[in-house]
Amino acid sequence: MDRTSRFTVDAADDGRLDTLIARRLDLSRTQAATLIATGCVRVDARAEKASFRPAPGAEVVVELPPVQNPRTVLAEDIPLTIVYEDAELLVIDKPAGMVVHPGAGNPRHTLQNALLGLDTRLALVPRAGLVHRLDKDTSGLLVVARTPEVHTALVAALAAREISRQYVAVCTGVMTGGGTIDEPIGRHRSQRLKMTVRRDGRPAVTHYRVLKRFRAHTLVRVELESGRTHQIRVHLAHIGFPIVGDPLYGGRRRIPAGCTPALAEALDAFHRQALHAARLALTHPVTGRRMQWEAAPPADLNSLITALERDAV
């Protein structure tokens, strides 16, 4: 089923973008605003705010998210590491290997299943309260809204770049310094499982800073402005420093000449992207208090970093 809706604004469509989309697609204004905030709407190929008033003749493209019957997402008793919780939100430290949302090939045992098992009221919140996502083999922090109102507020905050997300990653290659990657990202034209930098993609900005250099690798801190699929993995590979262990963008596994046997073994055994969501900061949508959380890298990534440090001695 085609989930892309296109229409041309006519003279009778005077008004805000969220109101226009709600009327044209028979949605609530909140639903339309959420689509805009999550980057699903383009006006003449540009992202605009909900308050934007498109002129007659403008083309509006809306990419609707997949329809998911909440009854098909079963509650499951899966242990979760809860970093923080109150009546409005949860912060979860997701393990590597856990899929966030059910989908083709992963109908169960996902974070969404686990959240429904943790709190049945999350069935009343879009996507069981998940505001953003991490790739299956990326570990780290995720925020979960516990009410529809908080979900809407956090989605809008994410779109407005008011939620700070910092990651640590081990890259192949030795960087001379940090920088910013400002390159649009879209679906790869021939390999549909991959994303790539392409001129007609969605805007994407990634900041990176060198934390430590090794013989043939670099430990970096990465901060996102946008949140495109595979963004960090695509951007770092694009500038020639792919993440260690990345099965899609990492290329051939490289063992540095002359490295210790322990490092060679650690690199050979690392079969996921060495990427961890280490820090999350946001303004609480109810209390207005600025809050932040940190999660240490998991054991496998810590072991890899330790092997790199010992090799460098």
Image (cartoon, helix red, strand yellow):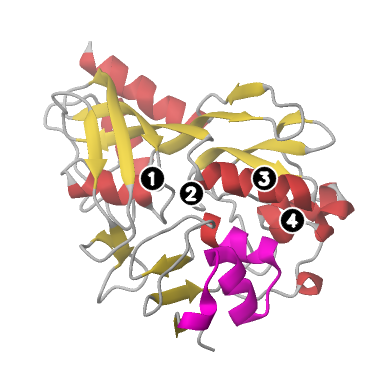
Determine contact: label 2, label 3, CB under 8 Å.
no
Alpha carbon distance from label 4 to label 2:
20 Å
Residue 223 belongs to magenta span? no
Q: Is residue 259 above or below residue 160?
A: above
Q: Which residues are magenta?
A: 11-35
**Residue bearing mark 4:** 128
Assess disc 1: are there few (<14), some (14-19) or many (≥20) residues with their C-alpha within 10 Å of its C-alpha. many
Q: Secondary structure at mark 2?
A: loop
Alpha carbon distance from label 4 to label 3:
15 Å
**Which mark is first along the chain, 2 or 4?**
4
**Which mark is first along the chain, 1 or 3?**
3
| Residue that appears at 38% across and 45% down | 273
Alpha carbon distance from label 2 to label 1:
7 Å
Quarter of the figure with residue 225: top left
The label shown at residue 273 is: 1
Assess disc 3: are there few (<14), some (14-19) or many (≥20) residues with their C-alpha within 10 Å of its C-alpha. some
Q: Secondary structure at mark 3?
A: helix
Q: Give the quarter of the figure containing the N terminus.
A: bottom right
**Residue bearing mark 3:** 153
Determine contact: label 4, label 3, CB under 8 Å.
no
Amino acid type of disc 1? Answer: Gln
Amino acid type of disc 2? Answer: Asp
Q: Nearer the viewer, mark 4 or mark 3?
A: 3
Q: Is residue 32 above or below residue 161?
A: below
Q: Position of residue 196 (x, y in %)?
A: 26, 61
Quarter of the figure with residue 255: top left
Q: Nearer the viewer, mark 4 or mark 2?
A: 4
Q: Nearer the viewer, mark 3 or mark 1?
A: 3
Quarter of the figure with residue 214: top left
Amino acid type of disc 3? Answer: Ala
Determine contact: label 2, label 1, CB under 8 Å.
yes
Q: Secondary structure at mark 1?
A: loop
